[in-house]
Amino acid sequence: MKILLAIDYSTFAQGAVRAVIRQVQPRGTLVRVLHVVAPAPALISTRMSPDVVPYFEKAEEDRRKQAKKLVLDAAQKLRKAGFTAKEIVDTGDPKERIIRYATEWGADLIVLGSHGWKGLGRFLMGSVSEAVTRHAECSVQVVRIRRAAKRTKARKSKL
C-alpha cells in the first residue's frame, strides 16, 4: 500500500501521523511524508524594494529547513513503528501539490489532518482537506481531533 501523509505544523497533522501508525499494518506499506511550503506573499514587495531580497531569501531558506525537519521527524516516527517512509518537501499551493503528488506517485490513500475551520475562517483560509477529498483520484482519510481532546491539551499548555 502507498500512503501519502500530508502534514503541516499543527496538532491535527500529528494526529494524522498517529492515525497511520495505529490503523495501518507497516509491512509492505510505503509512506511518503509531504509538507508543502506555500509561497510567501513577500515576492511582490521584493520587486518594489530590491533591498528586501536578501532577507526574503534567508526567510525562505529558514522555512524550507523547518519543513525538512518537520517531515524528517514524522518519517522517523513512522520508521520506528516499522514503516518504510520517505520525506518530501515541495513548494506551491498545498491543495494542488498534494493532489498532484498523490496522482503522480500512484498513492492508494492520502492521510491528512483537518483544522476544523468553519464559517469565515474556512472561507478566508480555505480547506486543504476538503479540496483534497473532492479532487483526489484515490481514497482520502481526514483525521480530526475531538474538541474535548483539544480543550484538555489547551488547559495543560496553560499550566
Image: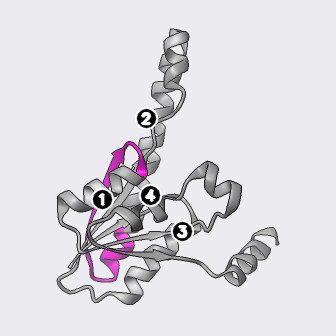
Residue at 26 percent of width and 67 percent of height: 137
Helix, strand or loop for disc 2? helix
Question: What is the spatial separation of the Cα atoms under label 3 and label 2, in whole angstroms?
Answer: 27 Å
Residue at 41 percent of width and 42 percent of height: 64
Helix, strand or loop for disc 3? loop
Question: What is the spatial separation of the Cα atoms under label 1 and label 2, in whole angstroms?
Answer: 17 Å
Task: Give the total number of marks visible in the rendering.
Answer: 4
Q: Earlier in the sequence, mark 3 or mark 2?
A: 2
Residue 114, numbered circle: 3
- Residue occupied by mark 2: 61
Q: Residues within 10 Å of mark 2 (few under 14, many from 20)?
A: few
Q: Is residue 152 above or below residue 59?
A: below
Question: What is the spatial separation of the Cα atoms under label 3 and label 4, in whole angstroms?
Answer: 17 Å
Q: Say which amino acid is labelled 1.
A: Glu
> 20 and 135: which one is in front?
135
Tell whether position 46 is magenta: no
Q: Quadrant of the C terminus?
A: bottom right
Magenta stretch bounds: 75-94
Q: Say which amino acid is labelled 4.
A: Leu
Q: Earlier in the sequence, mark 1 or mark 3?
A: 1
Q: Say which amino acid is labelled 3.
A: Ser
Helix, strand or loop for disc 4? helix
